[in-house]
Image (tube, coloured by chain):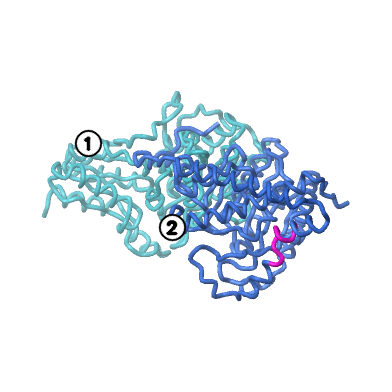
């Protein structure tokens, strides 16, 4: 057995470590919790999130699975129906398509279709997003698709704090929850107060208050939006940055309140523009705050193409801080 | 080695009655469908009754069931209340799922009936999870997982059998091979139609059983369950059977001949068992008459219960989309 991990005291750690400590806490606090997924055990996790958990908790609770996404996600659904609290890791959102039938037709459908006889307290974690030069089949951002589905809760921790504490909220939810961890965040370091024990997943968070324009985003785009806000600030434009945190159910109130203050809005979403979560956010603003707006709604999304391998093409495909700055500037100071 | 089914008079009557109940229940469903009181899909189990009845005899109340979309027989044989099932067929609030599931989606938590599933193969991974949960919670329950031979075409079958064996899960795989997946004849869909052989590819032991012979099915299922419990391993039963009626109510049956259907009807599970009982003087004509009368009374009661049932208020439509708590 490895040396024990520090027990939840450090308040500065990487996003990866925060994910791991969240899993450890869950395993230590509830004997019904167990983990399933590809290479989570001996390999230590594709992104090294689960490294050391097999040695600490053993093979019964840290279950390496074969490459059978549909079977092990469905097994998670069945185990949740029969009294356990499974946490299933799908290596990346791209592979979750192989398990989509189990997620959509079973996990989110059975509670309603059985007339409330069964709940499915299942947590699915998966990596999402681009930026690692691994081409289209490993770089998609499909969290917006999942946010389309009634019955799911969709969490997108963008900070170390949320990576550390959203899992606890997810496990407390009697419904299926998907946690999307953006691949570019695992090495990011961050702080949270040492006495912090949980986060409220019902609310979006205003990361930076501003008067001139709201930058609304989530996940891997949060830090691009914060960078953009810094750059805009040097030009005298005061941007507000909102982290949606939970894509379903959306915290519409925080969005509307922000837009009512700034009267301008750019939505930044790594998903494709057409039919995206940014479209949903924009439409809610149009429905509920149309007359608060001083300018048309704008979006910065991924280009509508499979994410290419070549670095210059991938960078051009994904939302970037410079694009956000340009779009926000044009909105506040039309040329 | 092979365990004999204890065929006392009461048990023989019980098996026959369980099969006739399913047949008559479904005949009433067809009437109600024609009267447009049952809508949507209606996949009849007609001809396959011996499979469910035989397998359920081998299960205890602690065991779990994963069913198919042709699950009227599976639910009735498990002992789910025909009243709640008929009300569900008619989309009523007093149905087992408050009218949200209908014919293809019966659930009964109390009887560990984990649902009819209308995605072919979609129930197989659930069986893994239910069996794993039982095993991890140190319960000795077995999960009986029903599926048609069409599910063998799906990846879930292969993924599930592999994991069941790898993790040594207590699952009884019950392949209801009725020879057609909708209109696709098994030999037109499968390069290898020996399903026991396929299961053995995952080192899951199994056997073929005559799915038209209720005693043979019960005997095989009892042996299989004993083996699963004692050897801590999954087991596979291929029950060769036949559906006498169309795939669903929308099927013109262009893919098979009337002669073929008639030939199978002569081998029907109820006809065959009843004829055998009569020939061996194990049942009296008046016992059959009394049994049928009781069943028809039970079904009439179920219909009356369903007819009297109210409708789920539309204001409740979104209830249970998310649950407030995990039911105890």
Indicate the position of residue B168 as horizontal and vertical percent values: 73, 48
Residue B152 at what x, y percent from top left? Answer: 63, 63
Choose mark 1 or mark 2, whichever is in front.
1
Query: How many angstroms separate mark 1 from mark 2 (CA)?
Result: 33 Å
Q: Nearer the viewer, residue A131 or A118?
A: A118
Query: What numbered label is drawn on residue A139?
Result: 2
Q: Looking at this view, is B185 or A102 the one in front?
A: B185
Residue B308, quarter of picture: top left
Residue A128 in sight in this render: yes
- Whether residue A193 is in magenta: the answer is no
Residue A257 — which label? 1
* Hue used for the chain lettered A: cyan
First in sequence: mark 1 vs mark 2? 2
What are the residue bounds of the magenta stretch?
Answer: B266-273
Looking at the image, which residue is at 25% across and 45% down?
A: A284
Chain hosting mark 2: A
Relative side of A85 to B10, left or right: left
For the colour blue, the matching chain is B
Q: Position of residue A78 (x, y in %)?
A: 58, 45
Asked whether, in this view, residue A326 is left or right of residue B282, the answer is: left
């Amino acid at each position: 057995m490895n040396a024990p991990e520090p027990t939840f005291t450090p308040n500065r750690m990487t996003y990866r470590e925060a994910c791991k400590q969240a899993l450890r806490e869950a395993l230590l606090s509830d004997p019904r919790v167990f983990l399933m997924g590809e290479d989570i055990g001996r390999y230590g996790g594709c992104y090294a999130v689960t490294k050391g958990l097999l040695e600490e908790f053993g093979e019964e609770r840290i279950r390496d699975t074969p490459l059978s996404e549909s079977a092990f996600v469905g097994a998670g659904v069945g185990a949740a129906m029969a009294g356990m609290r499974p946490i299933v890791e799908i290596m990346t959102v791209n592979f979750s398509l192989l398990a989509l039938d189990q997620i959509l037709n079973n996990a989110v459908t059975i509670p309603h279709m059985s007339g409330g006889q069964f709940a499915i307290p299942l947590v699915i974690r998966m990596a999402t997003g681009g930026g690692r030069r691994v081409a289209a089949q490993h770089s998609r951002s499909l969290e917006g698709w999942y946010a389309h589905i009634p019955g799911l809760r969709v969490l997108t921790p963008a900070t170390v704090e949320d990576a550390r504490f959203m899992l606890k909220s997810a496990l407390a939810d009697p419904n299926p929850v998907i946690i999307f961890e953006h691949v570019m965040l695992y090495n990011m370091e961050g702080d949270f107060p040492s006495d912090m024990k949980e986060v409220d997943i019902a609310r979006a968070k205003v990361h930076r208050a501003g008067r001139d324009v709201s930058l609304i985003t989530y996940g891997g785009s949060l830090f691009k939006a914060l960078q953009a806000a810094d750059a805009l600030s040097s030009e005298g434009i005061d941007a507000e940055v909102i982290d949606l945190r939970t894509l379903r159910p959306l915290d519409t109130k925080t969005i509307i309140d922000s837009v009512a203050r700034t009267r301008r809005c750019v939505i930044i979403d790594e998903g494709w523009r057409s039919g995206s979560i940014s479209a949903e956010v924009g439409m809610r603003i149009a429905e509920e705050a149309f007359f608060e707006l001083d300018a048309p709604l704008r979006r910065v999304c991924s280009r509508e193409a499979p994410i290419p391998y070549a670095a210059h093409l991938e960078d051009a495909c994904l939302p970037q801080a410079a694009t956000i700055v340009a779009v926000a500037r044009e909105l506040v100071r039309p040329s | 080695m092979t365990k004999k089914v204890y065929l006392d008079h009461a048990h023989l009557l019980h098996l026959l009655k369980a099969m006739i109940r399913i047949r008559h229940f479904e005949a009433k469903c067809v009437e109600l469908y024609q009267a447009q009181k049952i809508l949507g899909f209606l996949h009849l189990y007609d001809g396959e009754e011996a499979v469910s009845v035989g397998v359920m005899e081998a299960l205890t109340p602690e065991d779990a069931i994963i069913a198919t979309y042709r699950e009227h027989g599976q639910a009735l044989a498990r002992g789910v209340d025909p009243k709640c099932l008929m009300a569900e067929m008619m989309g009523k609030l007093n149905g087992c799922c408050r009218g949200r599931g209908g014919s293809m989606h019966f659930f009964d938590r109390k009887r560990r009936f984990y649902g009819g599933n209308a995605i072919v193969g979609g129930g197989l991974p659930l069986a893994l999870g239910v069996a794993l949960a039982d095993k991890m919670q140190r319960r000795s329950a077995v999960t009986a997982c029903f599926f048609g031979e069409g599910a063998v075409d799906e990846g879930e079958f292969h993924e599930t059998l592999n994991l069941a064996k790898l993790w040594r899960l207590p699952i009884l795989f019950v392949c209801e091979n009725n020879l057609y997946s909708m209109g696709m004849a098994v030999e037109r869909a499968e390069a290898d139609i020996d399903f026991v052989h396929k299961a053995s590819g995952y080192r899951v032991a199994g056997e073929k059983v005559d799915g038209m012979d209720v005693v043979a099915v019960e005997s095989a299922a009892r042996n299989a369950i004993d083996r699963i419990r004692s050897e801590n391993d999954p087991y596979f039963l291929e029950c060769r059977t036949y559906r006498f009626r169309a795939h669903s109510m929308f099927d013109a049956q262009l893919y098979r001949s009337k002669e073929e259907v008639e030939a199978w009807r002569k081998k029907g599970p109820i006809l065959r068992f009843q004829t055998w009982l009569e020939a061996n003087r194990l049942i009296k004509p008046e016992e059959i008459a009394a049994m049928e009368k009781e069943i028809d009374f039970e079904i009439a009661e179920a219909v009356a219960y369903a007819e009297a049932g109210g409708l789920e208020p539309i204001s409740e439509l979104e209830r249970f989309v998310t649950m407030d708590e995990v039911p105890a």
